[in-house]
Image (tube, rainbow, N blue to C red):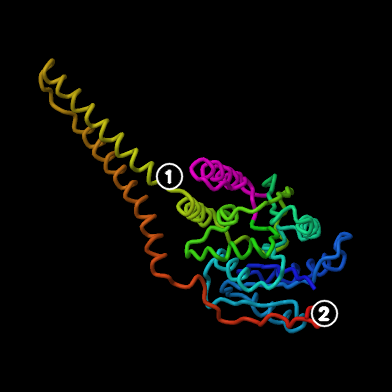
């Protein structure tokens, strides 16, 4: 019997776990006219400090379809997605957010699409950002435009981590064991045929988002450094332009001195030039430092996550044998 694994990263989501579980049960029973395969719900507790793990643990005792992977500390959503994909046993694997911003009602249509064999993945994207702060929406769109310009890996604007994949694609994603992970880029980089489903933004069912503007900014920088070397080229170009500007200024000063003499140089302008060049140097060094830091972390070969607790997968039924 086929099985569909649902990977659900959780971090301080005690208010939404039960709501998500109830909604998944409803979709599994109704299915929108589509007979879904047996579900495997893999909740990955990313070092929560509330009752998230306890709630999932209780669900797993009542329902053998529910599995808990609990980290020893907070390793981040990317590590949680990787851990869930690694633990999944289904022929089809989905990644979803527990806050119900990823509509479970789309799962039957996604499954039907994959069953045809025409696609290896059905992914989702938001066509609106209703409910988000305008400044956050502006920078999000700017990020997608930027990374698609400077990277060979194209990421669809509004793409969510919510997608359903075949086992072949999941294995390809798992083969990329890099420590610094950016799942949206990885899903795109591995290729495979992907169908996109669009939907309007859905607000959280309960609780508050754990993604602050600063965290999203750092996450976007991780994505840029993970899938583009353009910043390094930009740093080189800035250095070349600075040298050319300096040579032109030297020629101008020499000609000016020969023609009009040597007037007293302006101290404020000199300070401004020094500060500008110093800022450019620090910017370029910072860009180099970002890539060097990523390389340093990769060479350490630390584990992407550490499990504190986990439940074994449910045993295969006799019909599967």
Nearer mark to the viewer, of 1 and 2: 2
Q: Say left or right for 15 vs 272.
A: right
Q: Position of residue 255 (x, y in %)?
A: 15, 19
The residue depicted at 13 percent of the width and 15 percent of the height is 259
Could you say which is closer to the camera, residue 26 or residue 18? 26
Is residue 268 part of the magenta span, yes or no?
A: no
Q: Between disc 1 and disc 2, whose residue precedes?
A: 1
Instruction: Mark 1: give few (<14), some (14-19) or many (20+) Cα within 10 Å.
Output: some
Q: Quadrant of residue 271?
A: top left
The residue depicted at 42 percent of the width and 65 percent of the height is 298
**Distance between the alpha carbons at the discs numbered 1 and 2:** 53 Å
Q: Position of residue 205 (x, y in %)?
A: 73, 61
Q: Which mark is residue 87?
A: none
Q: Which residue is mark 2?
A: 319
Could you say which is closer to the camera, residue 35 or residue 246? 35
12 up-or-down from 136: above or below: below
Q: Among all residues in the image, which is located at the extreme right?
A: 33
Count of number-bearing discs: 2
The residue depicted at 57 percent of the width and 66 percent of the height is 174
**Region in magenta:** 131-160
The C terminus appears in which quarter of the rendering? bottom right
* Secondary structure state at the residue bearing disc 2: helix
Instruction: Mark 2: give few (<14), some (14-19) or many (20+) Cα within 10 Å.
Output: few
Is residue 141 part of the magenta span, yes or no?
A: yes
Q: Position of residue 299 (x, y in %)?
A: 39, 66
Q: Position of residue 317 (x, y in %)?
A: 79, 81
Q: Which residue is mark 1?
A: 230
221 up-or-down from 261: above or below: below
Q: Say left or right for 318 vs 135.
A: right
């Amino acid at each position: 019997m086929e099985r569909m694994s649902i990977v659900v990263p959780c971090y301080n989501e005690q208010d939404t776990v039960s709501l998500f579980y109830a909604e998944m049960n409803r979709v599994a029973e109704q299915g929108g006219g589509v007979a879904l395969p047996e579900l495997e719900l893999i909740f990955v507790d990313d070092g929560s400090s509330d009752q998230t793990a306890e709630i999932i643990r209780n669900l797993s005792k009542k329902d053998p379809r529910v599995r808990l992977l609990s980290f020893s500390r907070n390793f981040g959503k990317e590590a949680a997605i990787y851990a869930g994909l690694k633990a999944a046993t289904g022929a089809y694997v989905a990644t979803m957010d527990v806050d119900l911003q990823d509509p479970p009602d789309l799962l039957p249509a996604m499954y039907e699409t994959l069953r045809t064999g025409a696609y290896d993945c059905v992914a989702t994207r938001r066509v609106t950002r209703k409910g988000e702060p305008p400044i956050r929406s502006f920078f999000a769109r700017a990020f997608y435009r930027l990374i698609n310009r400077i990277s060979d890996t194209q990421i669809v604007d509004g793409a969510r981590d919510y997608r359903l994949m075949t086992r072949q694609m999941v294995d390809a994603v798992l083969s990329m064991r890099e420590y610094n992970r950016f799942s949206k880029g990885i899903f795109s980089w591995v290729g495979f045929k992907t169908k996109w489903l669009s939907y309007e933004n859905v607000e959280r069912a309960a609780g508050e988002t754990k993604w602050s503007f600063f965290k999203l900014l750092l996450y976007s920088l991780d994505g840029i450094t993970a899938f583009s070397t353009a910043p390094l080229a930009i740093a080189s170009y800035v250095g070349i332009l600075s040298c050319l500007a300096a040579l032109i200024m030297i020629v101008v000063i020499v000609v000016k001195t020969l023609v009009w003499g040597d007037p007293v140089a302006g101290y404020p302008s000199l300070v401004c030039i020094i500060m500008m060049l110093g800022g450019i140097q620090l910017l370029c060094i910072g860009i180099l430092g970002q890539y060097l830091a990523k390389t340093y972390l990769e060479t350490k070969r630390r584990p992407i996550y550490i499990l504190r607790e986990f439940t074994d997968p449910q045993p295969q039924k006799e019909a599967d044998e």
